[in-house]
Amino acid sequence: MRAADADRQAVADQLKAALDEGRLDLHEYDERLQQAYAAKTYGDLQPLLGDLPAAALPVPAQRGALAAPAGNATSAELTRRWVMEVWASWIPVVGVTSAIWLISSISAGELLNFWPIWVAGPWGAVLIFITLTGLATGEPRKQAEKKARKEQAKQLKRERKALELEADESVHPATNGDENRA
């Protein structure tokens, strides 16, 4: 059976716990972690935990189960954030072009043809289409999950770097200056 992202993450968490307990060294942890993220099936994941005590083998994730993206944000919050991101560039551009039109009209002493509509109208129509199709396909949730995965990967990378630095310091301890006096 094919493994899901949540299954790979569960194995990575168990490997991290084994590293913290001293059951794996940094090199072995890194190898197994790479194999865990490259795993396609449960058969690929099982050997990574087989020699570790009390390591629960990954259980298939339920179909349709989604990871909780963006902390505990509600669906309405995710939707609001996503819509604001979609429309974020349109609002200031239309505001600036309308301000230019207004200043031009005041300078001319009469109301000029409202040319910003040629910026706002077509672009707004495209954004309405993007918004409606995105809402229909669940794009706010997908984008939040993608951001959550990226943040998780960044956190894992920071942890790995910290562990590498820690391991490097234990192999090459800093000198206290006594050796340099000779």
Image (cartoon, rainbow, N blue to C red):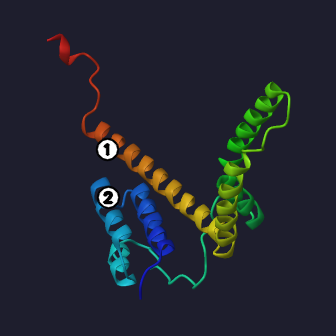
Distance from label 2 to label 1 (Cα)? 12 Å
Residue 167, numbered circle = 1
Residue 51 pos. (x, y %): 33, 74
- Where residue 52 sits, quadrant-wise, is bottom left
Q: Badges 2 and 1: C-beta atoms under 8 Å apart?
A: no
Q: Residue 181 carries which label?
A: none
Looking at the picture, tell me which residue is in the foreground, 142 or 10. Answer: 142
Residue 106 is at least partly visible in this image: yes
Would residue 72 be seen by someone viewing this image from the given angle? Answer: no
Per the image, the residue denoted by label 2 is 30
Name the residue furthest top: 181
- The residue shown at (44%, 47%) is 158
Q: In which quarter of the image is residue 45?
A: bottom left
Residue 26 percent location from the top left of the image: 31, 54
Residue type at mark 2? Asp
Q: Nearer the viewer, residue 20 or 160?
A: 160
Location of the C terminus by quadrant is: top left
Residue drawn at x 42%, y 58% is 21
Give the amino acid at mark 1: Ala
